Amino acid sequence: MSAILPGATLGMLGSGQLGRMFAIEARRLGYRVHVFSPDSDTPAGEVANASWIAEYDDEDSLKEFANTVDVVSLEFENIDVQALHVLEQYVPVRPGPLTLHTAQHRAREKTALRNMGLATAPFHLVHSADELSRAQQELGEGILKTAAWGYDGKGQQRLSPQADAKSVWQNFGTDEAVFEGLVKFRCEFSVIGVRTEAGDMQLYGAVENAHANHILDVSLAPAPSVPESAVQRAQEMTRVVMEKLDTVGVLCIEFFLDEHDEPIINEIAPRPHNSGHLTIDAHYVCQFEQQVRAICGLPLGTTQQRQPAAMVNLLGDLWPVHGQPNWVAALSNPLVKLHLYGKQDARPGRKMGHLTALGDSVAAAETTAQSARQSLLER
Ligand code: AMP
């Protein structure tokens, strides 16, 4: 396979912040970027050379888009794989349908992982109140999740062992869900891998993640609570997943560290990940540049980290009713970097941007990042 060289046009399915950060790196490397999504006025569209605004099942538009680009990647997994099959007739799609199809359905994903011999939370696929009740009897306390199309904790409900399956199922509003047993974890962390079509692979170190209301809140790297043996095991598991799914591009695995310090896979994202945003400022080569390199068949960059780092997400809740957060106060510490995604409408829970701080230790970086975020509220 010959490499897709700078000057070529890279296609991106999805137009949110992940597509935006990809487009920034791609343009820095001398590529052109076209994004495809149903939305107008988007974070990625602001940075791209061209935006295609059409539904993912609009085959004519997909074909026209494919004919303007040299390769297609994605930043969003809630896309019907049929779109990838259409595009593949005209242009390489990386990652391809197998990775996407596996990652976008929780039961399919967990079954595939088990078949690879990798640990996941215990689970049952449920289609009715009776099936949910049986799953509760077997697994006790757990979390009911929509089988597909969920993100950031949407379509999830924690159930006590006594929860009434009938009323929960009636209100849950889906015909297919996964009920997972509750994993008692010491912490949550993620590993990001990148792989080329030739099978070359690089793995980042572990990033420790804390969530608030099911949305990522803080990421720390190197992960302070994850022993080195667990990091290595998780990296090995990530390697296995990318090889078995023949993934080309970037893939993130979210893990629980269980009571025995063993990594248990929570879920796979077949794309760059929020927990990898700190690689932009803390690593020689960030996850988005790696995505460009991988899909273009260029040599991969190092995953080496330059300095301990912390990232805090900035949700719409931080915005005052009138005006803006106090950017001047947040940036008064010179070790703080600000990333905003160009979103106009600051709704509660909406990811608007993030702050990254570097430090001599992860603890110092976290203190800096947290206080910078806090200072956004100063009036
Ligand atoms: P998810 O959307 O599957 O990543 O879930 C969002 C968050 O809910 C995770 O990051 C965990 O904090 C929590 N969670 C999800 N599944 C489980 C589980 N089986 N056991 C314990 N906590 C969970």
Image (cartoon, rainbow, N blue to C red):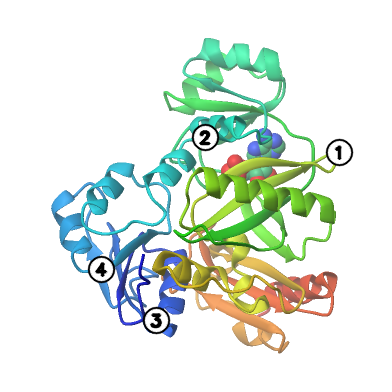
Q: Position of residue 56 (x, y in %)?
A: 26, 50
Does mark 4 have its CB less than 8 Å from ligand 1? Answer: no
Earlier in the chain: of badge 1 and badge 4, it is: 4
* Badge 3: residue crowd in 10 Å (few <14, some 14–19, many ≥20): some
**What residue would you read off at disc 4?**
69
Q: Nearer the viewer, mark 4 or mark 3?
A: 4
| Secondary structure of the residue carrying numbered label 2 | helix
Rounded to the nearest angstrom, the CA distance separating label 4 from label 3 is 14 Å
**What residue would you read off at disc 1?**
260
**What residue would you read off at disc 3?**
27
Residues 113 and 368: in front is: 113
Is residue 60 shown above or below 169? Answer: below
| Secondary structure of the residue carrying numbered label 4 | loop
Earlier in the chain: of badge 3 and badge 1, it is: 3
**The quarter of the displayed image where residue 274 is located:** bottom right
Q: Identify the amino acid type marked 3.
A: Arg
Q: Identify the amino acid type marked 2.
A: Arg
